[in-house]
Image (cartoon, helix red, strand yellow):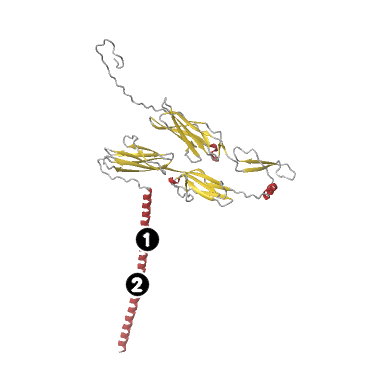
């Protein structure tokens, strides 16, 4: 009988059965809904940071990650240009997550036909998956930068007294609706009667906006200032003031970042201009694998050193079974470099394969690892960049010394050869003179004998 019931009257004996209940948590993976871009802006304006919209992803477990794209390229946060905020809310009744990512964006004229999308990345039973939203195009408003005027006339020639129509148009969006026409003579009079000094400051950055280059390429950068007085110009990279202007003869991953060229007129308070350059340095994945035996002699550490941008995704496989290795450790991704590490204790010889893939290419490298019982020469891990530079400098110094010694030996050899040649020539002349003297003596003796 159940333990919680009262004992009936007159019961002589009873029997209880104890039952233990064990609870096991069960996690059910739920694919999120297709992302939707809501609260879309009616239009965007250049030089103004404005809320573009919100990407909403519902009913996901576990929670996913939302990424914004423009024309198929990832939008990275840039101060005062790209501002992204992500909120995650869990439904307590269902345990599912809703992710909302808001995007504030400062467009340029080139964004007039740009397609914006957002993608949610989540993990399912078969691994990492993505779901993309429908693309959205926004109307970009920008001021008029160029004004053209045309003379509309039915005749190709215009004479005094003819009626002509002047049409003025600008290249802004939306097109300007109001125009003011001035007669040159009137403008001249206005300029002559004006005695106020106008301070002006213009800045031209080439290139500007978002620029994507490949590693190793050159990128000339110029910041031109036009002002009524002497202006102060300085550069800022990633919120840090630079000592010199940027110069890129061979781009590296560490050159990527947000550059700002700013100029000010100290005599005029509040008069300053700035332009932004967002430099992205892309590169195909490069892999170098190393291995070493751990101090306990019971396991080995295999490291896959990876370079590339966008950040490559890394997978490990072992030859034979071809199964994926999930227990890996990754270092922090800095300046386009990071490492993926695994620890193994192979009972037999195996071949580990490291696969690195990004949007540019897929790179595969393999490394043979002997069993723990078999001794082998472990490969050292990569030295840091400073040590590499020191080694390169030492190598250059040694090569320079060797070349210098060879040149000295060559010069000494030429001098010695000239000395020997000159000595032999002088010796021949001396021998020849001695021979002539002996011949003359013999002739004199013969003449003397004949006379006698």
* Label 1 packing within 10 angstroms: few (<14), some (14-19), many (20+): few
Query: Vertically, is 231 above or below 403?
Result: above
Residue 272: percent from the left, percent from the top?
55, 46
Q: Secondary structure at mark 1?
A: helix
Residues 352 and 386: in front is 386
- Relative horizontal placement of residue 34, taking residue 13 as reference (left or right): right
| Rendered residue at 53%/45% (across/down) | 274
| Residue lying farthest to the right in this orientation | 161
Residue 260: percent from the left, percent from the top?
50, 45
In which quadrant of the rendered image does the N terminus lie? Answer: top left
From this viewpoint, is residue 285 visible?
Answer: no
Tag 1 residue: 404
| Residue lying farthest to the bottom in this orientation | 452
Q: Secondary structure at mark 2?
A: helix
Tag 2 residue: 423
From this viewpoint, is residue 201 visible?
Answer: yes
- Relative horizontal placement of residue 274, taking residue 282 as reference (left or right): right
Residue 310: percent from the left, percent from the top?
43, 40
Residue 373: percent from the left, percent from the top?
24, 40
């Amino acid at each position: 009988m159940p333990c919680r019931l009262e004992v009936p009257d007159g019961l002589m004996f009873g029997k209880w059965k104890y039952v233990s209940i064990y609870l096991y948590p069960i996690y059910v993976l739920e694919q999120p809904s297709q992302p939707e871009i809501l609260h879309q802006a009616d239009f965007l304006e250049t030089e103004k940071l404005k809320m573009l919209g919100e990407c909403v992803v519902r009913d996901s477990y576990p929670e996913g990650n939302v990424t914004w794209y423009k024309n198929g390229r990832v939008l990275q946060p840039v101060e005062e240009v790209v501002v992204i905020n992500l909120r995650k809310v869990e439904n307590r009744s269902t345990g599912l997550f809703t992710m909302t990512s808001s995007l504030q964006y400062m467009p340029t004229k080139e964004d007039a036909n740009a397609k914006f999308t957002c993608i949610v990345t989540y993990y399912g039973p078969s691994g990492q998956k993505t779901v993309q939203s429908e693309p959205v195009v926004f109307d970009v408003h920008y001021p008029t930068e160029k004004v053209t005027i045309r003379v509309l006339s039915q005749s190709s020639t215009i004479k005094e007294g003819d009626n002509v129509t002047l049409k003025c148009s600008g290249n802004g969006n939306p097109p300007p609706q109001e125009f003011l026409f001035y007669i040159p003579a009137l403008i001249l009079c206005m300029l002559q009667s004006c005695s106020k000094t106008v301070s002006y400051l213009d800045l031209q950055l080439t290139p500007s906006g978002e620029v994507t280059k490949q590693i190793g390429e050159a990128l000339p950068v110029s910041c031109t200032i036009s002002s009524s007085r002497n202006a102060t110009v300085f550069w800022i990279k990633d919120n840090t003031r630079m000592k010199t202007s940027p110069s890129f003869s061979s781009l590296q991953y560490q050159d990527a970042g947000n550059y700002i060229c700013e100029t000010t007129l100290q005599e005029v308070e509040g008069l300053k201009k700035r332009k932004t350059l967002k430099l992205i340095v892309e590169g195909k994945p490069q892999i170098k694998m190393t291995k070493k035996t751990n101090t306990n002699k019971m396991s080995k550490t295999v490291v896959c050193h990876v370079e590339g941008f966008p950040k490559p995704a890394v997978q490990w496989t072992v030859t034979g079974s071809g199964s994926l290795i999930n227990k890996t450790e990754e270092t922090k991704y800095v300046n386009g470099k990071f490492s993926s590490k695994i620890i193994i204790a192979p009972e037999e010889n195996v071949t580990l394969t490291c696969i690195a893939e990004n949007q540019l290419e897929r790179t595969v490298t393999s490394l043979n690892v002997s069993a723990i019982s078999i001794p082998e020469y472990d490969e050292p891990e990569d030295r840091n960049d400073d040590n590499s530079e020191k080694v390169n400098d030492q190598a250059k110094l040694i090569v320079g010394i060797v070349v210098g010694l060879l040149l000295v030996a060559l010069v000494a050899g030429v001098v010695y050869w000239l000395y020997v040649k000159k000595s032999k020539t002088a010796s021949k002349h001396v021998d020849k003179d001695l021979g002539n003297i002996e011949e003359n003596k013999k002739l004199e003796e013969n003449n003397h004998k004949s006379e006698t």
